[in-house]
Amino acid sequence: MNIKLIGVTKRFKTVEVLSNVDLHVRDGELFTLLGPSGCGKTTTLRLIAGFYVPDEGKIMFGEREVQHIPTFKRNIGMVFQNYALWPHMTVHRNVAYGLQFKKEPKAEWPRIVNEALAKVGLVGYEDRYPGQLSGGQQQRVALARALALNPDVLLLDEPLSNLDAKIRGSVRAEIRKLQQALGITTVYVTHDQEEALTLSDRIGIMREGQLVQIGSPHDLYERPATRFVADFIGSNNLVAGKVKATGDDILVETELGLFRGYTHSEMRPGDKCTIAFRPENVEVGTEQPSAEENWIEGKISFASYMGSTLRYEMDHPAGFVLKADIKNPLHHEELGWGSDVYFCFPKSAALVIAD
Amino acid sequence: MSSGMSVVGLKRKLRDSKLWILPIYLFLIIFVIFPLVRLFIDSFTTADIQLSALNEVALTTDLLEEKVNAGEMGEALAAAHDIALQLNRSIDVVGQMIDALGRATFSQHELIAEWQEAQDKVAQEAAAMAELQEDPVAALAQARKSKALVHEIVRLPRRAFSVDFFLDVFRDRLYMKALGNSLLLGLATVATTSVIGFAVAYLLVRYDFPGRKAYNFLTTIPIVMPPLVGVLGFIFILGRGGTVNELFYQLADALEKSWPAVSNWLYDRLPFNFIYGWHGLLLVETCHLFPLITLNVVDSLSKIDASLEEAAESVGSVGFKRLFDVTIPLTIPGFVTGALLVFIGAFADFAAPMVVGLTNFIAPLAYMDIQQFTDRHLFKMGITVGAVMVLISVGLLLIAKRYISLKDYTTLSYKAVERKPLKGAKQAWAHVFLILLLIISYTPYLGVGLASFARSWSMSPLPTSWTLAHYEKILLYAPGYIINTFQFCILAVLMCILIGLPVAWVMARTDLRSRGALDILTTLVLALPGTALGIAYIRAFNMPILFSTPLANIWIIIPIVLAVRRLPYTVRSSYGSLLVVHRSMEEAAQSVGAGGLKTFKDVTFPLIWKGVLAGALFSFMTSIQESAATLLLAIPGWETMTVGIFTFYTGGTHGDAAALGFILIVVGVITLFVMDRLTSATTSGGLFG
Ligand SMILES: Nc1ncnc2c1ncn2[C@@H]1O[C@H](COP(=O)(O)OP(=O)(O)OP(=O)(O)O)[C@@H](O)[C@H]1O
Ligand SMILES: [Mg+2]
């Protein structure tokens, strides 16, 4: 089942929370809505679920226009952020409850419940009440409840945010595997970019009620279309500037000097732009590099060791903080704070983004 | 140094052991546990056989002596004759006592032997007395001997434990019928109040419409209903000669010419019987008690996380299905508390059934048994009924606990369900329902109000002439009722806070093992009918302990019984407020150096006082209405307003009773209003939560 949002606008009273959102979720893919808190992810998801009606625009499930169809007729499965398990029902009852509305024969219920629980690895917990389960188990019951109804669309609103970091990773992998195995169209909401990158077929980045870029994790990482996306996905050094010359390379003039880079968009000399280079592409040296390369001079202001990488931060007198990652710091002699250094990055790693 | 250490250590130990809580436990033991235990001991041990025949022998002997001294020989002979008869009856009475002792669970040979010996002696006396029916002087000499014997017998021990004595009440048709009636009334009232209370709560929590806040307050007011005059108010308006029927008569009159068919139809059926009988009783109880359901369900309903209902909708459950499968079950903890209070309220009401002309309910029966002093057997039955009432409340509590213990319906995040605006026809229906409900529930207020200002009121829709005389009498000539009520109730509320707050604190903040016991005890008191507690107090405090006067005869017993009765409200509201104040706030105060008491004073108390006060006000509002316990324990000169209402009512001065009742209503409504302001200004825990 593919889902389309066409020109969807949603207001609460007079506040416009979603503006003219166009979105196409393809059949069978796991699509993630990613964005900072309050950007409208939950609102979008609840529009798809049918808890809200859009003020403008259309929502399509396949060929069917659904914006005026109530939730319970949309055949969706939803996993809520707080799981919303009914505390007065056992796990079995929670999972089985929806079956009566599907007109499933009662004799089939135990089998269906059992299958759903088997999918999430919770067989044997049927008679417990939600209060007797751990957070992770509750989360899986919520997933089983959604899956038991064999929905066309699975909707998940920050399903992992109440789990601790350790099990988050494993549950994330489970959700992904299950989704792949079932081939169910899934919309997943999160504000955790790492979660989004590892889980999704495609990601839609939201900001202040608008979708700013849609693409695969790879696309978004390698080819952010805006400064916001470049900043939001992964870590990045961003320096604002102005296009000086175009050609094979683009020459950008900034407060930190003149840099060479590449771009995916049309640019003209004089255009405002941002040059973005990721810390992992920066080389740190104590000798001045050749004039051909992009480099910045400064003092180390901070170093943090994270096992597989060592991150340096450099304070530039113009008020910038630039980051550089040393991979595999085993063979690197750590520089002391205050050392004079050169951050050097190739033009192939310097993406110029139009503002 | 070591001694310094040990002093510090000792201090710490003392502090940790929380010795200051001991007086509170002592209070609870003396004034809750002891009376209840005493009630049960009494109901299982005394087989109260009427020994009045023996006492009569003594009294008639005195009379004989008087007559002989006065030389009235004819009368003296008659007295001697009476004595002979009374001695013969005494033989039977003692025989009954022996039979009773024979039913004791543990064999009472020695005691029975003593009584049998006594019976033999009485028989001898009776025979001797029968011989002396011609000679008053000789009879007197003999009678003096009989009197001494009788005195001895009356003092013989006659207590023995027997389950049989307790079961007497279950063998008595009358009592069983009464018990059945009262249980039925309780159940029926729970059913009606549940429907109305839930509907009101659902409207108020889930929908938005003009006047919602006003309805919210107005629908709580009917809990203020003075005993006796509350029902009376209904009768003034809806009774056979009440306002409504009088208006119908006038209508029938008016239509006599223009529309004779209708007029005749009316005449044939008038007066309508709105009140007398079960339907009237149910109406009265429902109007009075539905707010208890509303209050509790509102509390539960507004705590349901929105996602729980959305989840139901996402799997296809909507409308009534969702209401019954998800929403209502989630309100069960609050609902059960409310239903318990409603059940006890109706079950133990002893004024309303009498006023609407239904006899034979258990509470009034117990009340009358205890109030009379002539028949010891009935008195004993009263005690047993009290014990049975306690058993019933314990049973109900055990059932209720099962549902309330499911209470941990906590969700991780919390978002209230949004109110839906109610528009058009639906809104109109909501108004119709609420206004109709309010009109019916406020009927007694109208009746009581009118009656309190009426000089004469009969055969007319409204009083025909007005007067302030009733208020004058209440305020000027008998102000004691009001003064006593205020004094006792304020004192009771202070006791409630003084005891309830520490109890709540122990329950919310410590892991003392007594927490469970405190919880059970306060909930039990909540479920205890006033009649039962009143009887228990009469039994427990009728002997002098410490003071030369028995506690039951000192005025302080009334504020104490009121405090105990209303303690649960204060405990629950304080407990709820304490739960809202996160422990870390107190720990933060301690981390900057504040001691335990200081922390409580500077951090905890400022955050909870509104909740505590709201609970205290609720305790006050219900205390001034207490009638069962205060009537049973009434001490001459220390009567409360509710006792005054009964006195005036039974004395036939309904106007004065109405005036007292109306003052009580006004005070109650004001208290509720203040409470409403307090609780709406804060997010303290629910009153009953
Ligand atoms: N029922 C509502 N009434 C009014 N405003 C609302 C309502 N629900 C959401 N909003 C506002 O709409 C905006 C978007 O909310 P939404 O819940 O969609 O954000 P989100 O992206 O899910 O954020 P988060 O990551 O914090 O969950 C926010 O500014 C929020 O305050
Ligand atoms: Mg959200």
Image (tube, rainbow, N blue to C red):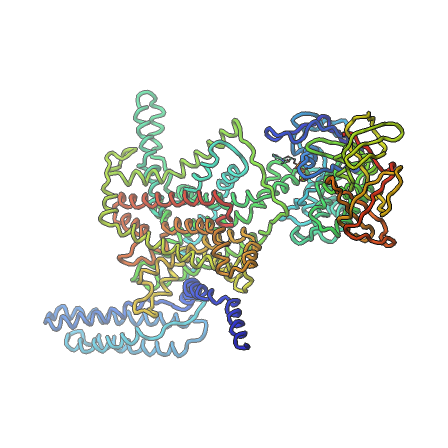
Who is closer to the viewer here, B310 or A296? A296
Q: Is residue A69 visible?
A: yes
Above/below status of B54 relative to A92? below
B251, B348: nearer the viewer = B348
Side of B301 where B65 appears, left or right: left
Q: Left or right: where does residue A123 sit relative to residue B421? A: right
Depth check, front residue: B410 or B386: B410
Q: Quadrant of residue A258?
A: top right
- When the figure is inspected, residue A219 is found, relative to residue A342, above or below; the finding is above
Q: Could you say where residue B256 lies in the image, as x and y percent from the top left?
A: 31, 24
Q: Position of residue B342 (x, y in %)?
A: 46, 48
Q: Which quadrant does ligand 2 occupy?
A: top right
Give percent across and percent down for residue B179.
Answer: 43, 54
Q: How many marks?
A: 0
- Residue drawn where x is 56% and y is 57% of the image: B587
The residue at 54%/45% (across/down) is B300
Q: Position of residue B430 (x, y in %)?
A: 49, 32
**Quarter where residue B567 is shown:** bottom left
Q: Quadrant of residue A107?
A: top right
Name the residue located 24 percent from the left edge and 40 percent from the top edge.
Answer: B468
A350 relative position to B413: left or right: right
Pick out the residue farthest to the left: B71
State whether residue B278 appears in this view: no
